[in-house]
Image (spheres, rainbow, N blue to C red):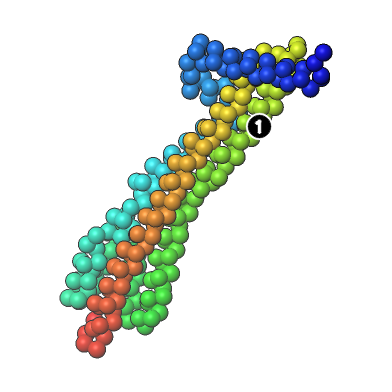
Amino acid sequence: MNPPWMRGAARAAVIGVGLGHALVAHAQAKPLNVFDQLAAGGSGIWVIGALSVLALAVTIERLVRFRVGRLAPAGLTDAVIKLWQRGELTEAQRLVSQTPSTLASVLGYLLAHRTADPASLSARAGDMASLALREQQQRAYPLAVVATVAPIVGLLGTVIGMIEAFHVIAFSSGLGDPSLLAGGISKALVNTAAGLAVALPSLAMHHYFKYRLQLIGIALEKQVNRVFDEVLIQPRGQDAH
Protein backbone atom coordinates (compact mmCIF):
# COMPACT_ATOMS: atom_id res chain seq x y z
CA MET A 1 0.00 0.00 0.00
CA ASN A 2 1.40 3.35 -1.04
CA PRO A 3 1.92 5.99 1.68
CA PRO A 4 -0.38 9.07 1.62
CA TRP A 5 2.30 11.42 0.32
CA MET A 6 2.90 9.22 -2.71
CA ARG A 7 -0.81 9.11 -3.47
CA GLY A 8 -0.92 12.93 -3.18
CA ALA A 9 2.06 13.32 -5.50
CA ALA A 10 0.51 10.98 -8.02
CA ARG A 11 -2.77 12.90 -7.91
CA ALA A 12 -0.91 16.20 -8.43
CA ALA A 13 0.99 14.73 -11.36
CA VAL A 14 -2.26 13.56 -12.94
CA ILE A 15 -3.77 17.01 -12.50
CA GLY A 16 -0.68 18.64 -14.01
CA VAL A 17 -0.71 16.33 -17.00
CA GLY A 18 -4.42 16.89 -17.44
CA LEU A 19 -3.97 20.65 -17.30
CA GLY A 20 -1.14 20.50 -19.82
CA HIS A 21 -3.19 18.39 -22.21
CA ALA A 22 -6.12 20.76 -21.79
CA LEU A 23 -3.93 23.77 -22.65
CA VAL A 24 -2.49 22.06 -25.71
CA ALA A 25 -5.89 20.88 -26.87
CA HIS A 26 -7.36 24.33 -26.34
CA ALA A 27 -4.54 26.00 -28.28
CA GLN A 28 -4.87 23.52 -31.12
CA ALA A 29 -8.65 23.64 -31.23
CA LYS A 30 -9.01 27.42 -31.17
CA PRO A 31 -6.40 29.93 -32.36
CA LEU A 32 -5.71 32.91 -30.12
CA ASN A 33 -7.99 35.83 -30.86
CA VAL A 34 -6.76 39.00 -29.20
CA PHE A 35 -10.08 40.83 -29.51
CA ASP A 36 -12.00 37.95 -27.94
CA GLN A 37 -9.50 37.84 -25.09
CA LEU A 38 -9.81 41.57 -24.53
CA ALA A 39 -13.60 41.40 -24.62
CA ALA A 40 -13.52 38.69 -21.95
CA GLY A 41 -11.02 40.55 -19.79
CA GLY A 42 -13.60 42.25 -17.61
CA SER A 43 -14.05 45.82 -16.45
CA GLY A 44 -10.30 46.36 -16.08
CA ILE A 45 -9.93 46.22 -19.86
CA TRP A 46 -12.43 49.06 -20.24
CA VAL A 47 -10.48 51.22 -17.80
CA ILE A 48 -7.24 50.46 -19.62
CA GLY A 49 -8.95 51.22 -22.93
CA ALA A 50 -10.03 54.63 -21.61
CA LEU A 51 -6.46 55.30 -20.47
CA SER A 52 -5.16 54.37 -23.91
CA VAL A 53 -7.54 56.86 -25.54
CA LEU A 54 -6.34 59.56 -23.15
CA ALA A 55 -2.69 58.77 -23.89
CA LEU A 56 -3.31 58.80 -27.64
CA ALA A 57 -5.15 62.15 -27.50
CA VAL A 58 -2.41 63.78 -25.41
CA THR A 59 0.31 62.39 -27.68
CA ILE A 60 -1.34 63.71 -30.84
CA GLU A 61 -1.97 67.12 -29.27
CA ARG A 62 1.64 67.40 -28.09
CA LEU A 63 3.07 66.29 -31.43
CA VAL A 64 1.04 68.97 -33.20
CA ARG A 65 1.43 71.87 -30.76
CA PHE A 66 4.68 71.23 -28.93
CA ARG A 67 7.15 72.17 -31.66
CA VAL A 68 10.04 74.58 -31.97
CA GLY A 69 8.17 76.58 -34.62
CA ARG A 70 5.34 77.31 -32.20
CA LEU A 71 7.55 78.32 -29.28
CA ALA A 72 10.69 79.74 -30.87
CA PRO A 73 10.02 80.45 -34.57
CA ALA A 74 13.09 80.46 -36.79
CA GLY A 75 14.07 83.85 -38.16
CA LEU A 76 12.04 85.92 -35.71
CA THR A 77 15.03 86.97 -33.62
CA ASP A 78 17.04 87.92 -36.72
CA ALA A 79 14.22 90.11 -38.03
CA VAL A 80 13.65 91.81 -34.66
CA ILE A 81 17.35 92.51 -34.15
CA LYS A 82 17.67 94.11 -37.59
CA LEU A 83 14.63 96.33 -37.02
CA TRP A 84 15.84 97.21 -33.53
CA GLN A 85 19.31 98.19 -34.76
CA ARG A 86 17.76 100.43 -37.44
CA GLY A 87 15.56 102.07 -34.83
CA GLU A 88 12.33 100.74 -36.31
CA LEU A 89 10.91 99.77 -32.93
CA THR A 90 7.26 100.16 -33.92
CA GLU A 91 7.75 97.77 -36.81
CA ALA A 92 9.54 95.32 -34.50
CA GLN A 93 6.68 95.42 -32.00
CA ARG A 94 4.18 94.85 -34.81
CA LEU A 95 6.18 91.85 -35.98
CA VAL A 96 6.26 90.14 -32.58
CA SER A 97 2.55 90.83 -32.05
CA GLN A 98 1.79 89.04 -35.32
CA THR A 99 3.87 85.99 -34.36
CA PRO A 100 2.20 84.35 -31.36
CA SER A 101 4.83 82.29 -29.55
CA THR A 102 6.84 82.19 -26.34
CA LEU A 103 9.81 83.82 -28.05
CA ALA A 104 7.60 86.61 -29.41
CA SER A 105 6.21 87.28 -25.92
CA VAL A 106 9.72 87.58 -24.48
CA LEU A 107 10.90 89.80 -27.33
CA GLY A 108 7.84 91.99 -26.98
CA TYR A 109 8.57 92.47 -23.29
CA LEU A 110 12.19 93.36 -24.02
CA LEU A 111 11.08 95.90 -26.61
CA ALA A 112 8.58 97.49 -24.27
CA HIS A 113 11.11 97.74 -21.41
CA ARG A 114 14.28 98.29 -23.41
CA THR A 115 15.44 101.19 -21.22
CA ALA A 116 15.39 99.08 -18.03
CA ASP A 117 18.45 97.56 -16.44
CA PRO A 118 19.70 94.59 -18.55
CA ALA A 119 20.08 92.40 -15.45
CA SER A 120 16.44 92.96 -14.50
CA LEU A 121 15.36 92.35 -18.07
CA SER A 122 17.35 89.13 -18.20
CA ALA A 123 15.78 87.83 -14.99
CA ARG A 124 12.28 88.70 -16.16
CA ALA A 125 12.81 87.17 -19.61
CA GLY A 126 14.09 83.99 -17.97
CA ASP A 127 11.02 83.82 -15.73
CA MET A 128 8.68 84.26 -18.70
CA ALA A 129 10.38 81.52 -20.72
CA SER A 130 10.54 79.16 -17.73
CA LEU A 131 6.84 79.60 -16.98
CA ALA A 132 5.88 78.97 -20.60
CA LEU A 133 7.98 75.79 -20.73
CA ARG A 134 6.55 74.49 -17.46
CA GLU A 135 3.04 75.00 -18.85
CA GLN A 136 3.99 72.97 -21.90
CA GLN A 137 5.43 70.21 -19.73
CA GLN A 138 2.29 70.14 -17.59
CA ARG A 139 0.18 69.39 -20.65
CA ALA A 140 2.13 66.17 -21.20
CA TYR A 141 1.72 65.08 -17.56
CA PRO A 142 -1.31 62.81 -18.31
CA LEU A 143 1.12 60.50 -20.12
CA ALA A 144 2.99 59.95 -16.85
CA VAL A 145 -0.33 59.25 -15.11
CA VAL A 146 -1.31 56.66 -17.73
CA ALA A 147 2.13 55.03 -17.56
CA THR A 148 1.72 54.65 -13.78
CA VAL A 149 -1.95 53.72 -13.50
CA ALA A 150 -2.39 51.35 -16.47
CA PRO A 151 -0.10 48.56 -15.14
CA ILE A 152 -1.72 48.77 -11.70
CA VAL A 153 -5.19 48.47 -13.20
CA GLY A 154 -3.95 45.52 -15.27
CA LEU A 155 -2.52 43.85 -12.17
CA LEU A 156 -5.75 44.37 -10.27
CA GLY A 157 -7.70 42.84 -13.14
CA THR A 158 -5.33 39.88 -13.15
CA VAL A 159 -5.75 39.29 -9.41
CA ILE A 160 -9.53 39.47 -9.70
CA GLY A 161 -9.46 37.09 -12.67
CA MET A 162 -7.29 34.60 -10.78
CA ILE A 163 -9.67 34.71 -7.83
CA GLU A 164 -12.60 34.04 -10.13
CA ALA A 165 -10.74 31.21 -11.88
CA PHE A 166 -9.94 29.39 -8.64
CA HIS A 167 -13.45 30.06 -7.38
CA VAL A 168 -14.79 28.10 -10.35
CA ILE A 169 -12.51 25.16 -9.52
CA ALA A 170 -13.29 25.28 -5.81
CA PHE A 171 -17.05 25.06 -6.28
CA SER A 172 -17.16 22.64 -9.20
CA SER A 173 -17.53 18.90 -8.78
CA GLY A 174 -14.28 17.20 -7.84
CA LEU A 175 -11.26 19.01 -9.16
CA GLY A 176 -13.25 20.48 -12.00
CA ASP A 177 -12.30 20.80 -15.63
CA PRO A 178 -8.64 21.93 -15.94
CA SER A 179 -9.58 23.84 -19.08
CA LEU A 180 -11.75 26.11 -16.95
CA LEU A 181 -8.76 27.02 -14.83
CA ALA A 182 -6.59 27.51 -17.91
CA GLY A 183 -9.18 29.73 -19.55
CA GLY A 184 -9.64 31.77 -16.39
CA ILE A 185 -5.91 32.32 -15.99
CA SER A 186 -5.60 33.28 -19.65
CA LYS A 187 -8.34 35.90 -19.29
CA ALA A 188 -6.74 37.21 -16.11
CA LEU A 189 -3.30 37.64 -17.68
CA VAL A 190 -4.81 39.60 -20.55
CA ASN A 191 -5.34 42.46 -18.10
CA THR A 192 -1.64 42.62 -17.24
CA ALA A 193 -0.64 42.42 -20.89
CA ALA A 194 -3.08 45.18 -21.84
CA GLY A 195 -1.90 47.41 -19.00
CA LEU A 196 1.74 47.04 -19.99
CA ALA A 197 0.91 47.53 -23.68
CA VAL A 198 -0.61 50.92 -22.84
CA ALA A 199 1.91 51.96 -20.18
CA LEU A 200 5.12 51.38 -22.16
CA PRO A 201 4.32 53.67 -25.13
CA SER A 202 2.93 56.29 -22.74
CA LEU A 203 6.12 56.26 -20.70
CA ALA A 204 8.24 56.44 -23.86
CA MET A 205 6.29 59.44 -25.18
CA HIS A 206 6.46 61.17 -21.80
CA HIS A 207 10.26 60.98 -21.81
CA TYR A 208 10.35 62.00 -25.46
CA PHE A 209 8.42 65.20 -24.72
CA LYS A 210 10.67 65.92 -21.75
CA TYR A 211 13.65 65.62 -24.08
CA ARG A 212 11.98 67.89 -26.64
CA LEU A 213 11.26 70.39 -23.86
CA GLN A 214 14.95 70.61 -23.06
CA LEU A 215 15.85 71.15 -26.71
CA ILE A 216 13.26 73.91 -27.11
CA GLY A 217 14.39 75.53 -23.86
CA ILE A 218 17.98 75.63 -25.09
CA ALA A 219 16.92 77.09 -28.45
CA LEU A 220 14.79 79.72 -26.71
CA GLU A 221 17.62 80.69 -24.38
CA LYS A 222 20.05 81.09 -27.27
CA GLN A 223 17.66 83.37 -29.15
CA VAL A 224 17.02 85.62 -26.15
CA ASN A 225 20.74 85.80 -25.34
CA ARG A 226 21.38 87.05 -28.87
CA VAL A 227 19.10 90.02 -28.26
CA PHE A 228 21.01 90.93 -25.10
CA ASP A 229 24.42 90.47 -26.73
CA GLU A 230 23.65 92.32 -29.98
CA VAL A 231 21.21 95.02 -28.90
CA LEU A 232 20.71 95.52 -25.19
CA ILE A 233 24.24 95.19 -23.77
CA GLN A 234 26.86 95.71 -26.49
CA PRO A 235 25.57 98.98 -27.97
CA ARG A 236 24.79 100.74 -24.68
CA GLY A 237 27.87 102.88 -24.97
CA GLN A 238 27.01 103.74 -28.60
CA ASP A 239 23.33 103.91 -29.48
CA ALA A 240 20.79 102.10 -27.37
CA HIS A 241 17.82 103.73 -29.19
Residue 51 % position (x, y): 52, 37
Camera sees residue 149: yes
In the depicted structure, whether residue 204 falls above or below residue 15: below
Q: Residue at x 21, y 67 (%)?
A: 78
Q: State the residue in front, 229 or 128.
A: 229
Tell me the crowding category of disc 1: few under 14, some 14 to 19, or many 20 or more residues within 10 angstroms, Cα based: some
Camera sees residue 169: no
Q: State the residue in front, 53 or 189.
A: 189
Q: Is residue 207 left or right of residue 104?
A: right
Q: Residue at x 82, y 13 (%)?
A: 1
Q: Residue at x 42, y 55 (%)?
A: 210
Give the secondary structure at mark 1.
helix
Residue 231 % position (x, y): 25, 78
Q: Is residue 104 left or right of residue 83?
A: right
Amino acid type at mark 1: Val
Image quadrant assignment for residue 92: bottom left
Residue 38 % position (x, y): 53, 24
Q: Residue at x 37, y 76 (%)?
A: 122
Q: State the residue in front, 130 or 203.
A: 203
In the depicted structure, whether residue 148 falls above or below residue 181: below
Residue 149 % position (x, y): 57, 42
* Residue found at the very far bottom of the displayed protein: 237
Q: Is residue 211 left or right of residue 79?
A: right
Image quadrant assignment for residue 84: bottom left
Residue identifier under label 1: 159
* Residue found at the very far front of the displayed protein: 1
Which quadrant holds the C terminus?
bottom left
